[in-house]
Image (spheres, helix red, strand yellow):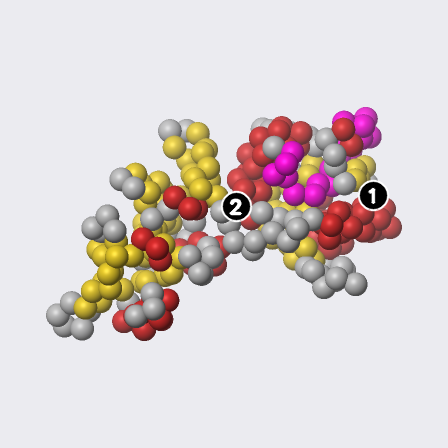
């Protein structure tokens, strides 16, 4: 049997319904709850940020419905999905959308386990995803757009959140630096300071300033401070 752990996102506008699924998943081996969401717009952002293997998705929610969430993400980019709803009439539509299964509330433990087994088989058959994000959603002028991680030059702290720097443009996002560091590929990005994360291939030089301080100069001329505690690891990453 595969030892693969599946990462699950639970989307439902009813807290008790989310808790019910969490309680059932707690009994299962090799399952990690990546996150929860209570409405459609939040679900879209969570899917893009967390890249879960499995999605439990309520059909009817405030804002965007479960079907609209799928349409926003695109069928090809969606994780394996189990729809949940109190309305059995949506079952046919769910399977038209290639859902792994469909749970009508209230469902019992065995019906849930059956749906989870079916989903596991589909997930095992899919290629393993990278655990690191390749896109970051940002809000701009009242709209949410997706920024490819490959375009990010560096990231700086902005109060409790962060700013993405892409060329001459800056995008504020509601993510903590620690959270971003954990989500980014450490072979590509490196946290040089508590307030800065840099794409390694954007670094032009490692600078040693008077007084024992360090900095990096990026290829666009930007200079960023390097923590003394991170200097040696950074040098090793750069092959210096």
Left or right of 66: which side holds 194?
left
Where residue 94 sits in the image (x, y, percent)?
76, 31
What's the mark number on residue 49?
2
Magenta stretch in the rendered image: 75-94
Eyeballing the image, is 215 above or below 78? below
Q: Is residue 80 magenta?
A: yes
**Looking at the figure, which quarter contains the N terminus?**
bottom right
**Looking at the figure, which quarter contains the C terminus?**
bottom left
Task: Mark yes or no: residue 179 visible.
Answer: no
Residue sticking out furthest to the right: 110
Dot 2: element: helix
Q: Residue at x 68, y 59 (%)?
A: 5
Q: Are marks 2 and 1 in contact (CB under 8 Å)?
A: no
Q: Residue at x 65, y 43 (%)?
A: 79
Displayed quadrant of residue 14: top right
Left or right of 158: which side holds 116?
right
Where residue 171 sits in the image (x, y, percent)?
35, 40
Dot 1: element: loop
Q: Residue at x 25, y 54 (%)?
A: 218
First along the sequence among labels 2 and 1: 2
Where residue 180 sits in the image (x, y, percent)?
44, 54
Q: Is the residue marked by circle 1 packed among few (<14), some (14-19), or many (20+) residues within 10 Å?
A: few
Q: Nearer the viewer, mark 2 or mark 1?
A: 2
> 1 or 93: which is nearer to us?
1
Measure how far apart labels 2 and 1 are at the Cα level.
29 Å
The residue singled out by tag 1 in the image is 107
Q: Is the residue marked by circle 2 packed among few (<14), some (14-19), or many (20+) residues within 10 Å?
A: some
Q: Residue at x 41, y 53 (%)?
A: 176
Displayed quadrant of residue 4: bottom right
């Amino acid at each position: 049997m595969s030892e693969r752990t599946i990462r699950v996102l639970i989307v439902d506008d009813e807290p008790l319904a989310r808790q019910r699924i969490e309680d059932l998943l707690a009994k299962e081996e090799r399952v990690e709850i990546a996150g929860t969401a209570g409405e459609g717009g939040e679900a879209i952002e969570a899917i893009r940020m967390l890249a879960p293997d499995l999605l439990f998705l309520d059909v009817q929610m405030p804002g965007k419905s479960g079907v609209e969430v799928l349409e926003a993400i695109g069928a090809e980019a969606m994780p394996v999905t189990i729809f949940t709803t109190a309305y059995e009439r949506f079952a046919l539509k769910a399977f038209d959308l290639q859902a792994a299964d469909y749970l009508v509330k209230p469902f019992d433990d065995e019906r849930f386990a059956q749906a989870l087994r079916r989903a596991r088989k589909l997930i095992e058959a899919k290629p393993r995803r990278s655990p690191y994000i390749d896109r970051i959603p940002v809000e701009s002028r009242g709209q949410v757009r997706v920024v490819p991680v490959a375009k990010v030059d560096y990231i700086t702290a902005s109060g409790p959140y962060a700013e993405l720097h892409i060329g001459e443009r800056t995008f504020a996002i509601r993510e903590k630096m620690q959270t971003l560091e954990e989500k980014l590929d450490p072979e590509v990005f490196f946290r040089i300071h508590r307030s800065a994360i840099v794409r390694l291939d954007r670094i032009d030089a490692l600078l040693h300033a008077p007084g024992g301080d360090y900095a990096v100069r990026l290829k666009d001329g930007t200079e960023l401070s390097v923590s003394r505690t991170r200097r040696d690891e950074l040098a090793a990453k750069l092959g210096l």
